[in-house]
Image (tube, rainbow, N blue to C red):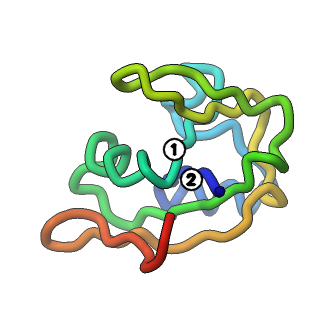
Amino acid sequence: MLIYKIFRRPEWDALRAKGQTLGAPVDLADRFIHFSTGAQVMETAARHFNGQSDLVLVACDPAALGADLKWEPSRGGALFPHLYRPLALSDVVWDKSLPLGATGHIFPEGPL
């Protein structure tokens, strides 16, 4: 199972340039990096990135993130993965563009 983070293109470019990130402004404010599971990520995109284009979907292996990854209740009591350390570029399993279509974001084909 993988977990997912949605970045705006400048945030992703900064991570690639620096090799790590503390996340987006919401992550900095909350003091952890927000992730979603495959079952949660489409709602996360619709709720927090509605109408935004030029996004990047990043996948990470939760086992590789170690003890700094905590599963905590959030939206409706569902458990969401939160990372309590910088996300390193080496933590990223894959990245794919997340374009905006006529009815919302267009996710990669296949299971998330």
77 sits to left or right of 94: left
- What residue sits 55% from the left and 50% below the top? 5
Q: Position of residue 23 (x, y in %)?
A: 62, 40
Q: Position of residue 3 (x, y in %)?
A: 61, 51
Residue farthest along the left direction in this orientation: 102
- What residue sits 43% from the left and 62% below the top? 55
* Residue type of the residue flagged with mark 2: Tyr
10 sits to left or right of 60: left
User: Does label 1 or label 2 sit earlier along the sequence?
Assistant: 2
**Which residue was labeled with disc 1?**
36
Q: Position of residue 52 (x, y in %)?
A: 29, 56
The crowding category of the residue bearing disc 2, from other C-alpha atoms within 10 Å (few below 14, some 14 to 19, many at least 20), is many
60 sits to left or right of 52: right
Q: Nearer the viewer, residue 46 or 26?
A: 46
Q: Are marks 1 and 2 in contact (CB under 8 Å)?
A: yes
- What residue sits 65% from the left and 56% below the top? 1
75 sits to left or right of 84: left
- Say if 20 sits above or below 26 in the image: below
- Label ID, residue 4: 2
- Say if 96 sits above or below 31 in the image: below
Number of callouts: 2
Q: CA distance from mark 1 to mark 2?
A: 5 Å
